[in-house]
Amino acid sequence: MHNPSGPGARPRIVVLGTGGTIAGTATGDPTLPGYTAGVLSVDALLEGIPSLSRLAQIHAEQVANLDSKDMEVAVWTRLAERVAHWLAQPEIAACVITHGTDTLEETAYFLQLVQRSHKPVVLTAAMRPATALDADGPQNLLDAVRVAVQPQALGLGVVCVLHGRVHAARDVTKASTHRMDAFTSGERGPLGEVDGDSLRLWRRPDTEPGAPFAIPPADAWPRVEIVLSHAGADGALVRCLVGQSALQPALRGLVVAGTGGGTVHQRLREALQWAEEQGVRVAIASRVGPLRGGAEDGLNAVKLRVRMLVELANSR
Ligand code: SIN
């Protein structure tokens, strides 16, 4: 175990709660399907896993408690500041973050871009609520702490631990709406897997070009929107967006989820060229998955948007 507190003592880990299905509870009526995400506190989640105390001394902090579809950039600012605060303490070995699955990859990649410490930052989530008989949250949280205390996890950057797999923030994406094994790292594959209390590492992640960036203050985030290229895409949405001078914050960038290898309908392309002439930054991703090569290598549209947001916020 990697332990700044010295040999023999259990490492000190901070677990930051943000909500998600992992903290979700089913409706009281057993005849009704469904559940509400982001209900239980992070303290309650930890109390349900007594074996954690064997691995680490844990301090918990609730940063937010929301369904991650409702994630806001102000929460990202707060979360990144808390991670930076805790990892700057010499006695803290790592941060673990509980999160919803829906925007996990966006939060993870944001943290990757602004994270300066070599200490581990490990995100985890669950596909089933905490009240389900077969809840996957406790195992995932236990696995996240198992990874966070490993010396091999130092310098890995921000990782996501889900269903026994360790994924790099840059590569991971949610690929199933229902399977327990809902996340993939695409052609690059996961970094490794959890093997009992140890971490079996298959590769180390690629370094992130240009990072670390400064954490954008909550009121300094620009607006970057995503538009999709599809049959009949005529650029009307782009022309509407660029024409809205009253938008707050102002539109600074557009990410296009193009077809195939990043191709864009010719009428949408004309609108995008006009947007660039108006000073709006444009970047192309693919709606199929991460593009290979170039500055956007390996980034899907939502992550390319996160990168553009952070770059623009840092260039003000
Ligand atoms: C959420 O993203 O907060 C809800 C869905 C989930 O965690 O699986």
Image (cartoon, grey):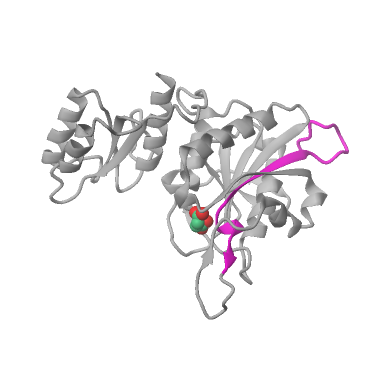
Q: Residue furthest bottom?
A: 31
Q: Is residue 169 visible?
A: no
Please state the total of marks drawn on the protein image.
0
Q: Residue at the spot x=38%, y=24% of the render?
A: 312
**Residue 150, how many percent across, how many down?**
71, 40
> Is residue 278 visible in this depiction of the protein?
yes
Residue furthest toward the front? 246
Q: Is residue 285 left or right of residue 186?
A: left
Q: Quadrant of residue 2?
A: top right
Is residue 7 shown in magenta? Answer: yes
- Seen in the image, is 191 located left or right of residue 48? left
In the image, 121 versus 222, the foreground residue is: 222
Q: What quarter of the picture does the C terminus occupy?
A: top left
Residue 87 x, y percent position in the rendering: 68, 30
| Residue at image point 53% right, 81% down | 31
- In the rendered view, tell whether residue 282 sits above or below residue 50: above
In x, y percent, where is residue 51? Answer: 79, 56
Pick the quarter of the image with the N terminus. top right
What segment carries the magenta color? 1-26
Q: Residue at x 77, y 38 (%)?
A: 12
Which residue does the image show at 76% across and 26% down from the upper left?
A: 90
| Residue placed furthest toward the right | 8
Q: Is residue 36 above or below residue 185?
A: below
Question: Position of 77 compared to 265: left or right?
Answer: right
The vertical placement of 161 against 5, above or below, is: below
Residue 11 lies within the magenta run: yes
100 and 167: which is toward the camera: 100
Q: Nearer the viewer, residue 197 or 109?
A: 109
Q: Quadrant of residue 47?
A: bottom right
Q: Can you give x and y, in whole percent of width and height, for residue 115 in the image?
A: 57, 29
